[in-house]
Image: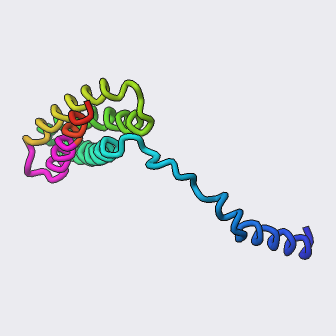
Amino acid sequence: MDRRELFCFLGWSFLSVNTPGAISQNKRDDHGDPVRNPSLFKASVACSKAAELCVGHCVEMLAQGDKSLIGCATNSREVLVVCNALRALAAQNSPHLADFARLSAAICKSCEAECRKYPQHATCKNCGDACASCAAECNRFT
């Protein structure tokens, strides 16, 4: 491609992007919120993040020889897996969402109870709080 072809290409590219028709074509159609269950989606994302941090903290403590957090690590790992699935099902409004939300609430409550045993660990406390919020949102949904 020589210089003249390059400038022509860039000129046409610029014109096609900056014309009103091209701008309106690039706009997203207004179909509302792309997530069908936004509150459940957000709660599952927050819970998943908190559980990920809690698992990481528990693993660090285990590496230092503190085995008291084994139950916390196990429960947080379960919540991590469940909340990732819950998020995906909530996003697509799965017909199985209500049943899965019931199961998720039970797993989140179990993790919350375990994390509450360790209020001295901020990550465990945060995970317990996130699990409580997620379980409440799951119960609202079912």
- Residue at x 57%, y 55% (from the top left corner): 28
What colour scheme has been applied to the protein in the rendered image? rainbow
**Camera-side residue: 1 or 21?**
21
Which of the 4 image quarters holds residue 13? bottom right
The image position of residue 76, as x and y in percent, is: 24, 37
Q: Nearer the viewer, residue 129 or 39?
A: 39
Which quadrant is home to the N terminus?
bottom right
User: What span is colored magenta in the figure?
Assistant: 118-133
Asked whether 125 falls inside the magenta stretch, the response is yes
What kind of secondary structure does the magenta stretch mostly adopt? helix
Residue at the image position 7 percent from the left and 41 percent from the top:
117
Q: Position of residue 97 (x, y in %)?
A: 35, 29
**Quick one: quadrant of the C terminus?**
top left
Residue 38 location in percent, x, y? 35, 45
Whether residue 122 is in magenta: the answer is yes
Classify 24 as above or below 111.
Answer: below
Along the line of sight, which residue is nearer the eye, 91 or 57? 91
Q: Residue at x 25, y 27 (%)?
A: 102
The residue nearer to you, when weighing 18 against 4, is 18
Q: Give the percent coordinates (x, y) of residue 88.
A: 41, 36
* Image: 131 above or below 26: above
Question: Looking at the rendering, which quadrant does residue 95 occupy?
Answer: top left
- On the question of residue 52 being in view, the answer is no
Residue at position x 35%, y 34% in the image: 86
Q: Is residue 60 left or right of residue 18?
A: left
Say whether residue 138 is visible.
Answer: yes
Q: How many marks?
A: 0
Q: Is residue 75 rendered to the left or right of residue 120?
A: right
